[in-house]
Every structure is written in C-alpha cells, then in structure tokens.
Amino acid sequence: MYHKFTLTYSSFLFLFVGVFSLFFLSSCDNDDCNYSYTSYEPIFMGYDEFRSVPVELQNPRSLKNVGKIYFYNSYLFINEINKGIHIINNSNPAAPVQVGFLKIIGNVDIAISGNILYADSYTDLLVIDMTIVTNPQLIQRINNTFDKQVFGENGYADPNYGIVVGWEEKEVIVQSNCQEPILEFDNSGSSPSGIAGSLARFVITQNYLYTLNGDNLKPYSIINPIFPEVENEIELGWGIETLFPYNNNLFIGSQRGMHIYNLDVPNAPKFISTYEHITSCDPVVVSENTAYVTLRNGTNCRNGVNELHLIDISDLENPLLINTESMINPYGLGVDSKNRNKTLFVCDGDAGLKVLNVTNPLNVEQIAADTSINGYDVIAHNDILMMIGKDGLYQYNYQNPQNLQLLSVIPTE
C-alpha cells in the first residue's frame, strides 16, 4: 500500500521536505500578506511491500518516459524511468521487435555481463539471469545498496518511513506579516559485457561492476556474477553524474569537471587528474587520445554553458582543452569504439542529432544532422547508431556518416 506522509508547515522546516516555489497572491492589507508555495509531499511504500513486488517479464508496452539505453548481444534495453526495462530484439535494426517489458519498480540504471543483468530498484541492487531473454530470473537482491531515495528530485524524505515512490504536489497558502522575510527556493534539482550510453551510472569492465551511489563510487567484484561483492566505496566529490570506462581507466563526468581514475587495481580506483570547467551537466566519452565532453545548461546546472569540449588526454595526468564547439543544449554523445571514421554523434536538444567529423580536433566539422528529433543519448556500434530521445527509439546506418540512413523508429506514446 502506498502512504502519503503529510507534513505541517512547521514540521517541513525540521525535515526539509520538498522544493518550494513561492508566488505572491496579493499585496499587503492591514499588515497581512497572503502568499503560497508548492509543497511536494513524499508518497511512501513500506520496505517489505516494495521488496515483495515481483520482478517479472510482462507483455511489450509503449515507450513513454524513457531513460537510459544499453546494448548487449543484439538486444536493446531501454529504461522506463522508475518502471522497468523495455527489451527489444535488435538483430535487424531496420525491424526491431519488442520482446517484453521487465517490470522493476524504481529502476533507472542497468549493466549486463555474461547474461547477468544488474539493475537498481530504488535502494536495492538486483541480479537477474537473462540467459533466456523471454524468461528472466531474479537471482538475488542486495538490500540498501543505494540511498538515492533520500534525496528525490523534489527534496528530502526521511527513509525511515519507507521507499519514496512518488511526490504529491500541494499548494499551501500562508498568511504572514508583510514585514517578515519570505524564503524563496529554486526548482533545481558481441562483447563480454554490453555497451552503455554516455549517461550511464552503471558500467562493467575487468570483471567489476562500477556503480554511483550519490557522489560515491562503489566497485563490485563480479568474478562470480551471481554474487557481486562490494569491495570498496570511494568518495568522488560533488555533482557526480556519469561513468565511462576506457583503456583501463574510468572517466567520470561531474558538474564541475571530468575526473580520471586508473583501474590497475580494479577494487581501488586511483585518482589521476581532473579537467575542470564551469558548473554544467557533463557526460563524457573517449576515443584514443581525445575525450569529448558536453556541457549543458539544464535543470540541475542552470548556470552552466552549452558547449562541446575536446580534451587532449595523451597525458592523463595533464588533460588539456584543445577545442570548444558551441551547442544549443547537448545531452548524451557517442563515438564508435573503433572510431574508423573519426565521427562523433551529439544529441543537441531541440537542435537535433548532430554528426561531427573530429578527425582534426582543432577543426571540427558538422557533416550531417537530423533536426527533426530531440535526443537524450546514443550508442554507436558497428555502423548502427541507436538513439533514445523524447520521441522514441531511432536507429540509423552511419556507414557513410555524411548521409545518415534512418532504419527504424519505435515512437513514444
């Protein structure tokens, strides 16, 4: 059963629940002012009830509020935010087939290795056997791995009351003396393993699953994939957002820069350096000696910029900015792991999908675009570009990157 937890005006100061926007409704009248704020009250589900919700494959359903994208062994896995995972047989990208919907409440991130799927479910890490794609089996649940239920997009909620499964918006009207100050809050807030998009917070490399828990990095040994063992927890600093493994290093996107960690000792990543930039939302991908970083002025990064940075990482201890390209509002980006064509794909908000020739990092050339779509993230693999966005799943052949060929679309509802 879902439970709403209603707070009084005084108790919200104690628990700091919600992010509030204040709006004046009237002017002063006899030293009294009426004003309102929007309170977001958490809706809780008890832990026992949450963990009793079955993880099961259901009939295919329409894409709606899509999130992360992951590719493994000719299958696409597309997250439906906090609902579960769309499973798509992508053996023929021109005619993808929706296999089913894996219901996992509270799911945002996934990673796959050796037919084992690792997925978050609010606070817990799930281990799911995908050997038979049409019959996934939950092997185990590792409780209380993540504490993200504490800080939702609408504020803080006391985890002692259970899992936060939603927020109820409520307008509160308060009468106050005009001389009293009013607080105003901003609204901010194949291969042994698969291929994640650039917005991933779960990645697998060297028999280790790396996950982000808030601003901390948690490496799990998956030498025994059924029983992942957390072996460490590394504090990374403020505003950590994405993970990208490359050549035995981990490139970490944050709101203040790109961090580089060495994975020679996989359960104890060693800090190498940081490339710092203005506060912005920041995914990163890497190919050869260049890191590509998009900086975005978005919900949680409203003071940032909209740019693509090309960074020389030939010396990992001294990453250097070598070029900056103006963007509209870039999200995810992708580069073919082979990078045969030196081509970079950028999801640039309402400006659409941009295809860039980055053969010469000092002279980036846009060679193609699809301005009809608004993309979130992409995976480029073997001449097939898989893009998830506001309008659905789009797939292209980029064998000739100057002439993208649209292969198929699964639209959002």
Image: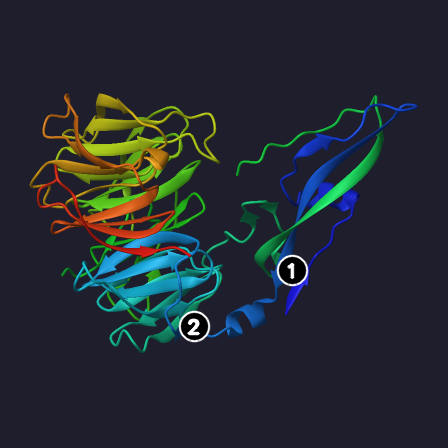
Q: In what quadrant of the picture does the N terminus appear?
A: bottom right
Q: Which residue is mark 2?
A: 55
Q: Residue at x 93, y 23 (%)?
A: 30
Amino acid type of disc 2? Val
SS assignment at label 2: loop
> Percent position (x, y) of residue 257?
34, 30
Q: Is residue 131 left or right of residue 174?
A: left
Pointer 1 with pointer 2, Cβ within 8 A: no
In the depicted structure, whether residue 31 falls above or below residue 66: above
Please say whether residue 210 is visible from this viewpoint: no
**Furthest-front residue in view?**
372
Disc 1 to disc 2, how far (Cα)? 23 Å
Question: Tag 2 or tag 1, which sits nearer the N-term?
Answer: 2
Closer to the camera in the image, 74 or 243: 74
User: What residue would you read off at disc 1?
Assistant: 161
Taking the spot 26% from the left edge, 77% from the top edge, the residue there is 132
